[in-house]
Image (tube, helix red, strand yellow):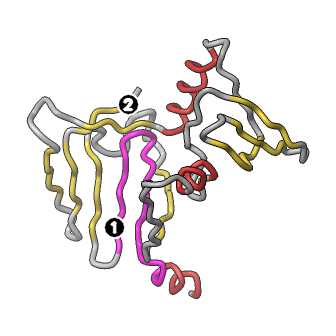
Amino acid sequence: MGIPMRARMIHSVKGRKSSIPYGKQHQYILSVDRANLNKELLNAAAKYSNVKMHFEHKLRDCNVDSGTITFQTNMGDVLEKQTDLIVGCDGAFSVVRKQFMRKSRFNYSHVYIPHGYKELTIPPRKGEFAMEPNYLHIWPRNTFMMIALPNLFSCTSLHSLQLIHILLKD
């Protein structure tokens, strides 16, 4: 399901590489392709007759006490369903989280950071990895950094929003 990453590979400005292990020799973390994970989870859930999946629906409301969830379809229809379990996987502005926040003793904070990111892809060379596959590759710089995961090598460039605005002006 994933590619073992045993260490971080730090790429210096001068092109030198340094490996920093995550743990002992046998320890690692996994690089998992999100699309493949979603596909595997959907396939696993589809094997259960009591699991109902609703695609192209937007969650509008839920009642965590009664198990009622309200969806709006892509055609604008409103559907109300009863469920035994509500799992909040509905994104940054979660309807489920908002309902839990109405309950007592639920702590939550939402903080915006002054950074943004851009995802890039490094295509494989002749079906092989473009870089060493068992590392999280990191190019740290003063005002930004880029990281690459070993899969088809999706890269993420992390930088200040201020830098993005400067680059977009030019």
Picture residue at 23% right of the left edge, 70% below the top: 13
Relative horizontal placement of residue 82, taking residue 87 as reference (left or right): right
Quarter holding residue 23: top left
Relative horizontal placement of residue 84, taking residue 21 as reference (left or right): right
Relative horizontal placement of residue 20, taking residue 146 as reference (left or right): left
Tag 1: amino acid: Met
Q: Is residue 19 above or below residue 143?
A: above
Picture residue at 64% right of the left edge, 18% below the top: 46
Q: Is residue 55 above or below residue 14?
A: above
Quarter holding residue 163: bottom left
Picture residue at 27% right of the left edge, 78% below the top: 142
Quarter of the figure that contains the N terminus: top left
Q: Earlier in the sequence, mark 1 or mark 2?
A: 2
Picture residue at 42% right of the left edge, 77% below the top: 160
Q: How far is disc 1 from disc 2 in space, using C-alphas? A: 24 Å
Question: Residue 38, image x and y in percent?
Answer: 55, 33
Quarter of the figure that contains the C terminus: bottom right
Tag 2: amino acid: Gly
Q: Is residue 49 above or below residue 156?
A: above
Q: Residues within 10 Å of mark 2 (few under 14, many from 20)?
A: few
| Camera-nearest residue between 91 and 117 | 91
Q: Is residue 146 magenta?
A: yes
Which residue in the structure is indicated by mark 1? Answer: 145
CB atoms at circles 1 and 2 under 8 Å apart? no
Relative horizontal placement of residue 14, taking residue 170 as reference (left or right): left
**Magenta segment range?**
144-163
Q: What is the secondary structure assignment of the residue under circle 2?
A: strand
Which residue in the structure is indicated by mark 2? Answer: 2
Question: Residue 86, image x and y in percent?
Answer: 59, 35
For the stretch drawn in magenta, the main secondary structure is strand
